[in-house]
Amino acid sequence: MTEKSIQETYAPNMKCFGCGPANEKGLHIRSFPQGDEVVAEWQPSVEYEAFPGMLSGGIIGTLLDCHCNWTAAYHLMKRNRLEHPPCTVTADYAIKLLRPTPTDKPVRMVARVVESSDDRAVVEGELIAHEKVTATCRGTFVAVKPGHPAYHRW
């Protein structure tokens, strides 16, 4: 049996397109804590290509946004000694596409928290293909409060 990802452990019924285990048409990003970082591996397929053999920038943005968001949620859970991660949303994020991302092999995502407070974290992440960084992300992710539409979505 394979190890459960953060998403499968804390949000098995979530329907997010990028990271929801319960979205049958989603990307099914599976993120795992590894020391001070959170890592994921994902296999692209042709329906996510911008042109033959290369991943769409929109899919790259989704991959990094979801993976970095879970990095923030997991960090805030640990930082604040909670039993479950708080529901976090993306306040801002920026993607830099450094080179085309090939789709012939799995890609790897690595993210780390670079700043945090009680209810938010700034995360930096990379998308790696063929052992080269093809895209980077920096974003701010905020734990939402009761009344927010995303509150308790997982």
Image (spheres, rainbow, N blue to C red):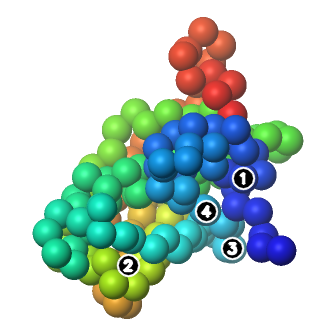
C-beta proximity under 8 Å, tags 2 and 4: no
Q: Percent position (x, y) of residue 43?
A: 45, 74
Q: Secondary structure at mark 1?
A: helix
Residue highlighted by disc 4 = 31
Residue highlighted by disc 3 = 35
The residue nearer to you, when weighing 131 against 105, is: 105
Q: Is residue 15 above or below residue 66?
A: above
Q: Residue at x 63, y 43 (%)?
A: 22
Q: Percent position (x, y) of residue 8?
A: 72, 53
Query: How far apart, in angstroms, are the residues tagged by discs 2 and 4?
Result: 15 Å
Q: Find the residue positioned furthest to the top.
A: 147
Q: Secondary structure at mark 3?
A: loop
Q: Residue at x 77, y 52 (%)?
A: 9
Judge from the rendering whether residue 150 lies leftward or rightward of residue 125; answer left or right: right
Task: Indicate the quadrant containing the N terminus: top left, top right, bottom left or bottom right.
Answer: bottom right
Q: Is residue 18 above or below residue 118?
A: below
Q: Of the residues shown, which amino acid type is indicated by label 1?
A: Glu
C-beta proximity under 8 Å, tags 2 and 3: no
Residue highlighted by disc 2 = 128
Query: How far apart, in angstroms, are the residues tagged by discs 3 and 4?
Result: 13 Å
Q: Residue at x 68, y 25 (%)?
A: 152
C-beta proximity under 8 Å, tags 3 and 4: no
Query: How far apart, in angstroms, are the residues tagged by discs 1 and 4?
Result: 9 Å
Q: Of the residues shown, which amino acid type is indicated by label 2?
A: Ile
Q: Residue at x 40, y 85 (%)?
A: 105
The residue nearer to you, when weighing 55 against 115, is: 55
Query: How far apart, in angstroms, are the residues tagged by discs 1 and 2?
Result: 23 Å
Of labels 1 and 4, earlier in sequence is: 1
Task: Indicate the quadrant containing the C terminus: top left, top right, bottom left or bottom right.
Answer: top right
